[in-house]
Image (cartoon, grey):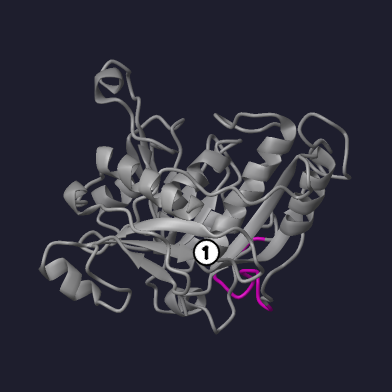
C-alpha cells in the first residue's frame, strides 16, 4: 500500500510538471507489481509491451524500478519512450551508513568508496602518445586498455575531449590529447576572447559549464556572462558524444555531476576525470555534515546505474588534509577520480 501511495504521488507531481515530450494525460498510478522489473504507466498494458507499440498509440511512459547489484536502495525512474531521456528531478539518496545519522560512519563509507577501484585498467598514461610531457602537474588518468573505445578512437583521430576549468595553466593533458589528434575543447570563463583556436585540434571557449542555464533576462545585462549546462553546449556544438570529460571546477563539481546524471548527459560520455573537493560541501550543497556526505556518496552511486566504474584515485597530499573543515579521517581536501563508462566498448 505504501508503494502504491508513493507511485500515486509521483505520478501526480509528474502530471503537474511534465517535461518536454511527456504527455501529462498518460500518467496514471498503478500499484507496484509483486514480481517484475518495470511498471507500465498505461493501465491496460503489462511490462511486455514494446516501446514502439506504446509510442504508436500515444501512451509512451513507463515507471521503471532499478536496483543496485549489492542491494542498495532501489530507484524509481519515469521513462518516456517518445523522448528517450529519463524524466528526473533529484537523485535518490542511499540509506544511511548506520542506524542513526553519523558523520563518522558516512565519512568512512564515502572515503572507502572513492579509494577502492571498481575495475582494473592496465594502461593509464599517455606515454605512447605524441606530445606527452612528464611535467604534467596532476595525474589526469584515462584508461587506454584495448577493451575500451578511447585508445581506438585516439588511433583513428576521432576522439573528443571536453575540459572544464577556471584560469588553470596546467594544460599539459589537453595539449597531449590535441597533439595525438583528438579534438579538444577547453571551457574557461576567464579568457578574453569568446573563442580561440590553438593549433589544429585545440579550442578555448569563454564559457563556464554550470548545472543550470542562466535566466536570459539577467544574462542579457551582464558583459561576457556566459554560463550553460553541458547538455546545452553539446546541442549547440552539434556533438553527440564526448570521449573524455575532464573537470576541475573548484567545488562546483557536485552540482554539475548531479545535472549530468539527472539529464542523462553522462550516457554521452566515455570517461570522466573529476577533481573533487571535500573540505566544504560545495556550491549549493546544503545540510549538516552527515547529510552532505550521504549526498556525495549517493551521487557517485548513481554513476553505477549508468555503468560507470572507478578505475583510478589520486589523493592530493599537497593540499590541506581536511574533511568538511576538520582535520579528520586521514582525508585530503582534494581527490582526482577517474571513471570509465563500461557500455562504451
Q: Quadrant of residue 173?
A: bottom right
Assess whether residue 177 is covered by the magenta stretch. no
In the rendered structure, the answer to whether residue 244 lies left or right of residue 233 reads right
Q: Is residue 315 visible?
A: no
In x, y percent, where is residue 136?
Answer: 67, 54
Q: Nearer the viewer, residue 99 or 233?
A: 99
Residue drawn at x 34%, y 34% is 213
Residue drawn at x 11%, y 70% is 56
Residue drawn at x 79%, y 45% is 107
Above or below — where is 249 with respect to 45?
A: above
Q: Is residue 280 visible?
A: yes
Q: Quadrant of residue 207?
A: top left
In the rendered structure, the answer to whether residue 80 lies left or right of residue 308 reads left
Callout 1 secondary element: helix
Q: Which residue is mark 1?
A: 305
Count the labels in the image: 1
Q: Quadrant of residue 118?
A: bottom right
Above or below — where is 244 with respect to 233?
A: below
- The span picked out in magenta is 122-133
In x, y percent, where is residue 270?
Answer: 47, 66
As drawn, the residue found furthest toward the left would be: 57
In x, y percent, where is residue 237?
Answer: 27, 51
In x, y percent, where is residue 143?
Answer: 60, 71
As drawn, the residue found furthest toward the front would be: 1
Amino acid at each position: 500500500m505504501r508503494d502504491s501511495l508513493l507511485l500515486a504521488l509521483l505520478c501526480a507531481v509528474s502530471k503537474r510538471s511534465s517535461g518536454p515530450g511527456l504527455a501529462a494525460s498518460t500518467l496514471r498510478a498503478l500499484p507496484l507489481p509483486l514480481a517484475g522489473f518495470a511498471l507500465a504507466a498505461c493501465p491496460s498494458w503489462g511490462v511486455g509491451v514494446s516501446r514502439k507499440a506504446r509510442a504508436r498509440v500515444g501512451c509512451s511512459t513507463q515507471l521503471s524500478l532499478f536496483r543496485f547489484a549489492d542491494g542498495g536502495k532501489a530507484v524509481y525512474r519515469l521513462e518516456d519512450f517518445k523522448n528517450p531521456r529519463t524524466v528526473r528531478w533529484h537523485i535518490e539518496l542511499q540509506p544511511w551508513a548506520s542506524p542513526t545519522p553519523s558523520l563518522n560512519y558516512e565519512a568512512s563509507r564515502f572515503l572507502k568508496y572513492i579509494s577502492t577501484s571498481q575495475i582494473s585498467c592496465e594502461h593509464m598514461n599517455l606515454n605512447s602518445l605524441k606530445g606527452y610531457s612528464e611535467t604534467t602537474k596532476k595525474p589526469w588518468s584515462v584508461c587506454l586498455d584495448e577493451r575500451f573505445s578511447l585508445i581506438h578512437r585516439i588511433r583513428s583521430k576521432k576522439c573528443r575531449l571536453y575540459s572544464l576549468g577556471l584560469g588553470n595553466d596546467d594544460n599539459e593533458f589537453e595539449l597531449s590529447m590535441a597533439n595525438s589528434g583528438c579534438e579538444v575543447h577547453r571551457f574557461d570563463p576567464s579568457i578574453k576572447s569568446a573563442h580561440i583556436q590553438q593549433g589544429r585540434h585545440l579550442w578555448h571557449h569563454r564559457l563556464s559549464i554550470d548545472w543550470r542555464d542562466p535566466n536570459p533576462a539577467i544574462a542579457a545585462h551582464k558583459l561576457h556572462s556566459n554560463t550553460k549546462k553541458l547538455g546545452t553546449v553539446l546541442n549547440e556544438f552539434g556533438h553527440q558524444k564526448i570521449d573524455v570529460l575532464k573537470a576541475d571546477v573548484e567545488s562546483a563539481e557536485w552540482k554539475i555531476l548531479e545535472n549530468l546524471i539527472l539529464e542523462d548527459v553522462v550516457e554521452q560520455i566515455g570517461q570522466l576525470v573529476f577533481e573533487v573537493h571535500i573540505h566544504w560541501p560545495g556550491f549549493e550543497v546544503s545540510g549538516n555534515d552527515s547529510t552532505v556526505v550521504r549526498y556525495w556518496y549517493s551521487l557517485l552511486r548513481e554513476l553505477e546505474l549508468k555503468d560507470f566504474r572507478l578505475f583510478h584515485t589520486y589523493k592530493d597530499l599537497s593540499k590541506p588534509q581536511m574533511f568538511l573543515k576538520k582535520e579528520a579521517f586521514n582525508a585530503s581536501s582534494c581527490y582526482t577520480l577517474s571513471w570509465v563508462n563500461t557500455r562504451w566498448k
